[in-house]
């Protein structure tokens, strides 16, 4: 995916020749495109490696999941990620949690009235309840997300949260079908997708793991990367962020090397401020 203002450094003729070579060295059998393992590596090597979207938690072209218990600040962290990414990409944030007034109050100083200025390449969308249709709801909302992102020329989409997109996340078959449709959308347009999710009721004193992701356990298998936010058992003001699943890059922020944050609000901007510069345990 191209960053804002980035020059096209790829020679068009070379790109076309590369695609033709890839096609000539592959075989289509039903749903499968088949190549030798060596040809797979050679063809993929011609394309640039994915760049980190935010720290090393989420990479270009991935479907990533961010999950946490209620009221731990996952939406705050997601907006913070979106604002930083919007300095390089066009970002569409689908907000199914807050009204526009709630969003305005969250990002305004209650004393001075000063509001935080976001990049103009960050777009926020909320669902119009009068436009909701009960029939084929999940397919329709995915189609509308696609329409909005294409119209706004966004290559990064964040959905807050997944329970508004799929009504039956606890059912393995429904969750699997929904995730297949989501990944197909990502591959069709070469997008980077971040999906926010909840956890079921759990003990907040226990370290958060992949088993705490709400919905069918099949969900976890469909994500390229998964990030979790937990609350520190030593200090309730602190949050920790750790990687739970990684496919690109390094497994850097594991349980023994979590990122420690405190939620602060400065000049109308509520955000996670780093409090860790060394290895810390998530418990």
Image: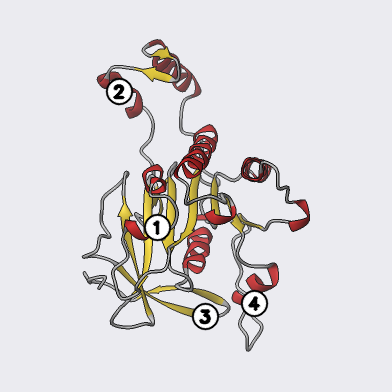
Give the CA separation, mark 2 to mark 4.
52 Å
- Name the residue rendered at 24%, 65% in the picture: 257
Discs 2, 1 touching: Cβ within 8 Å: no
Disc 2 element: helix
In percent of width and height, residue 236 lies at 36, 82
Q: Nearer the viewer, mark 1 or mark 3?
A: 1
- Name the residue rendered at 61%, 55% in the picture: 94
Give the CA separation, mark 4 to mark 3.
13 Å
- Name the residue rendered at 32%, 65% in the picture: 208
Who is closer to the viewer here, 3 or 82?
82
Which of disc 3 and disc 2 is earlier in sequence?
A: 2
Who is closer to the viewer here, 193 or 49?
193
Disc 1 element: loop
For residue 256, what is the image quadrant?
A: bottom left
Tell me the number on the disc at residue 266: 3
For residue 119, what is the image quadrant?
A: bottom right
For residue 99, what is the image quadrant?
A: bottom right
């Amino acid at each position: 995916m191209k960053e804002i203002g980035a020059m096209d450094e790829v020679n068009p003729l070379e790109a076309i020749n590369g695609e033709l070579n890839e096609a000539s060295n592959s075989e289509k059998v039903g749903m499968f495109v088949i190549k030798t393992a060596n040809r797979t590596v050679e063809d993929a090597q011609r394309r640039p490696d994915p760049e980190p979207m935010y720290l090393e938690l989420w990479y270009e072209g991935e479907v990533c999941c961010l999950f946490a218990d209620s009221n731990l600040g996952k939406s705050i962290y997601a907006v913070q990620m979106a604002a930083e990414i919007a300095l390089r990409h066009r970002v569409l944030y689908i907000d199914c949690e807050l009204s526009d007034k709630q969003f305005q109050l969250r990002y305004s100083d209650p004393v001075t009235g000063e509001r935080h200025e976001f990049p103009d390449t960050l777009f926020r969308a909320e669902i119009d309840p009068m436009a909701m249709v009960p029939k084929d709801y999940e397919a329709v909302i995915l189609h509308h997300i696609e329409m909005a992102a294409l119209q706004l020329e966004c290559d990064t989409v964040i959905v807050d949260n997944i329970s508004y997109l799929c009504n039956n996340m606890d059912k393995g078959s429904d969750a699997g079908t929904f995730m297949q449709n989501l990944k197909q959308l990502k591959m069709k347009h070469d997008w980077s997708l971040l999906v926010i999710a909840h956890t079921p009721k759990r003990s907040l004193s226990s370290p958060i793991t992949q088993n705490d992701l709400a919905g069918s356990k099949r969900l976890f298998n469909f994500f390229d990367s998964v990030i979790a936010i937990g609350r520190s058992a030593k200090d309730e003001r602190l949050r920790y962020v750790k990687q739970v699943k990684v496919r690109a890059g390094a497994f850097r922020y594991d349980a023994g090397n979590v990122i420690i944050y405190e939620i602060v609000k400065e000049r109308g901007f509520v955000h996670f401020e780093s409090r860790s510069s060394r290895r810390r345990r998530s418990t």
